[in-house]
Image (spheres, rainbow, N blue to C red):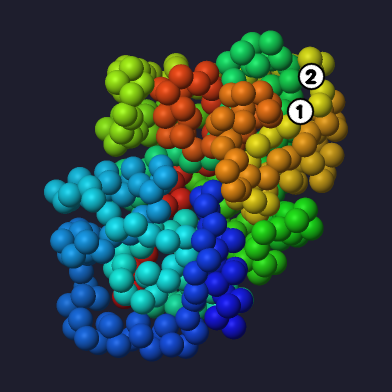
Amino acid sequence: MKKTKKAIAAILALTMVMAGLTACNSSDKKESSSSASSASGSSSANMTNEERIVAAAKEGKVGNWGLGNEYEIQALLTKYGQSTDYLSQSFDMDGFDDDSITLASAMTYNELGLVVNDYEGGYGYGDKVGTIDMNDEGVAMLEDNIFCTKEFAEKNPNTVKAFISASLKGWQYACEHTDEAAQIVFEAGSSVSSDHQAYMAAEVAKVVTTDTKGGAVSDYGNMDEEAMQQTLDLAKQYIKLDDSSAADKLSSMTLDDVRDTSYWEAAKNGDFGTPEKTDVSIQLKWLPQCQFMGYYVAAAKGYYDEVGLNVNIVPGGGDIGETTAVNNGTVDFGVTWVSNLISADAGGMDLLEIAQVYQRSAIVLVYKK
């Protein structure tokens, strides 16, 4: 059982690095959690977020994976007057489980599900954990978007608009039919169990249809100006680039350097003609899972066919970098985080966001109550 959980936990990693690590029996975890709560006294159950963050930071027990996932955590630590240093977290939740990490980073649609649920690969904590949400704390940065190069968009405007239109139609259907979407992704070569895929689909739908302030989003793919500006401002503050020219470019970057809303607006209104290029591809950030369910649903439901496109969905993983793949023309479109795109453009790439799929941050810090 431990070896099975080790394999599943590693493949469920959001980032593009795979790690082989072990997970403990869920009953042991629950007993350990109860013992830890008893030992710390009743006062810990009533701690505020600030008190939890300050205490964990002073102990050096705030965890994150790094690789561009750390900026929101650093912004949160700064908010409460703490050092931006964090504990390097493995790509499973074992550090959280064995109490070496007090506040562990988790995606609501991935690692948090492993912590809470008791299906295969899960840790089974249930309601014995709480979370600190980056959106509620005012340090949210936007994540998954659709992008291409500026040159590709200029040469193939109808293709770009058609791709956005069909993809967002897939996202809308997926969010309204999460069980079906999970099954479509599972049959497409899922990297996780069907139970976890179903959990992911339901949670991803919340990230796509809810903004950083908790409001409902009906315009799929909308590039909210305030949320994007906050993402850019935090990126400028926390992304560290060794090259001085890249650092200078980052410091002067504006939203107009990052995104163009005109393609999305035209796609939303169905205002586009025959695609200039019909055979196109999209590079994902990771293996097939419901983080990307809209594209798989669009393909399965024939939405790409309807707009005259033949789309190849290319899974990520290993050494595949989505920004590099798009920039060098290996693929036409890609899925990346806004901060990744900002960093890539500052470093000399010519990438352009054309739709913002995720409307709020999915990163939380999870703790044992």
Residue type of the residue flagged with mark 2: Lys
Residue 159 can be seen in this image: yes
Residue, disc 1: 280
Q: In the rendered image, which quarter contains the N terminus?
A: bottom right
Write the residue at 54% across / 49% down: 16
Q: Is residue 265 visible?
A: no
Label 1 CA crowd tier, 10 Å (few <14, some 14–19, many 20+): some
Residue 88 pos. (x, y %): 34, 57
Residue 206 image offset from top left, x and y in percent: 54, 52
Is 279 left, or right, of 283 in this rendering?
right
- Is 302 or 218 nearer to us in this picture? 302
Q: Is residue 47 positioned above or below 146 on the image?
A: below
Measure how far apart labels 2 and 1 are at the Cα level: 7 Å
Seen at 46% across and 34% down, the residue is 340
Secondary structure type for disc 2: loop
Image position, residue 108 (x, y; %): 48, 58
Residue 1 located left or right of residue 93: right
Q: Is residue 46 left or right of residue 63?
A: left
Query: What amino acid is labelled 1 in the image?
Result: Val
Label 2 close to label 1 by CB (< 8 Å): yes
View extreme (top): residue = 155
Left or right of 268: which side holds 135? Answer: left
Q: Residue at x 33, y 43 (%)?
A: 71
Which residue position holds label 2? 277
